[in-house]
Amino acid sequence: MTSNSKQLNQKLINKARALAGIKGYVTNLNIPDGEVIAHYHQLFRIEAAFRMAKSDLGARPIYHRKRDSIEAHLTIVLAALAISKSIEMQTGISIKRFVKLLRPIRTGIITINGNELIAEPEIPASISTILDKLSSGH
């Protein structure tokens, strides 16, 4: 190619066209090919769950060095993801919306002359309906 002319690399173009749409899967599992592909297609659910954990739950990187700390952290993260998914499935609303709806509901403890009083929140009917779905398991 000279400095004044441009050419297409036809060999590379032909190779790219021949490979267009082809995807390879490598696994160490002894399962049928179709099952490998089906599991790969479910990958977006895992990616969505981790995006949800990072954004909706406010997760951020935590740096651990000891194996026990790493395993404990992963256990907590995976438990949070499982609980979040369960909430979404039972209520039909996103975990982001669920957290936003419940965030203002707080219980307070008031101490007057040494006596503790618990100030329970008023829970709107719309939120009670959502909480009922969770307690019924549906």
Image (spheres, helix red, strand yellow):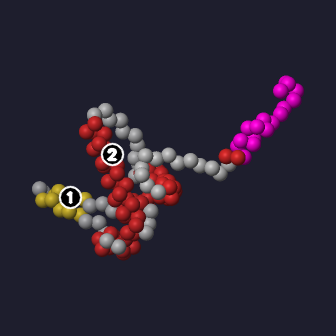
Q: Image height check: is 134 above or below 68?
A: below
The region drawn magenta spans 1-17
| Quarter of the rendering containing residue 113 | bottom left
Q: Which residue is mark 1?
A: 110
Determine the CA span between mark 2 and mark 1.
37 Å
Badge 2 crowding class, 10 Å Cα cut-off, few under 14, some 14 to 19, many 20 or more, is few
Residue 15 vs residue 39, the one in the foreground: 15
Q: Position of residue 86 (x, y in %)?
A: 36, 63
Q: Position of residue 111 (x, y in %)?
A: 17, 57
Q: Mark 1: which amino acid? A: Ile
Q: Residue furthest left?
A: 114
Q: Mark 2: which amino acid? A: Leu
Q: Residue furthest top?
A: 3
**For the residue labelled by badge 1, is the local secondary structure a helix, a strand or a loop?**
strand
Q: Position of residue 5 (x, y in %)?
A: 87, 29
Residue at point 81%, 36% (across, down): 8
Residue 27 vs residue 6, the one in the foreground: 27
Q: Residue furthest right?
A: 4
Query: Is the C-beta separation of discs 2 and 1 under 8 Å?
Result: no
> Could you say which disc has been placed on residue 74 in the image?
2
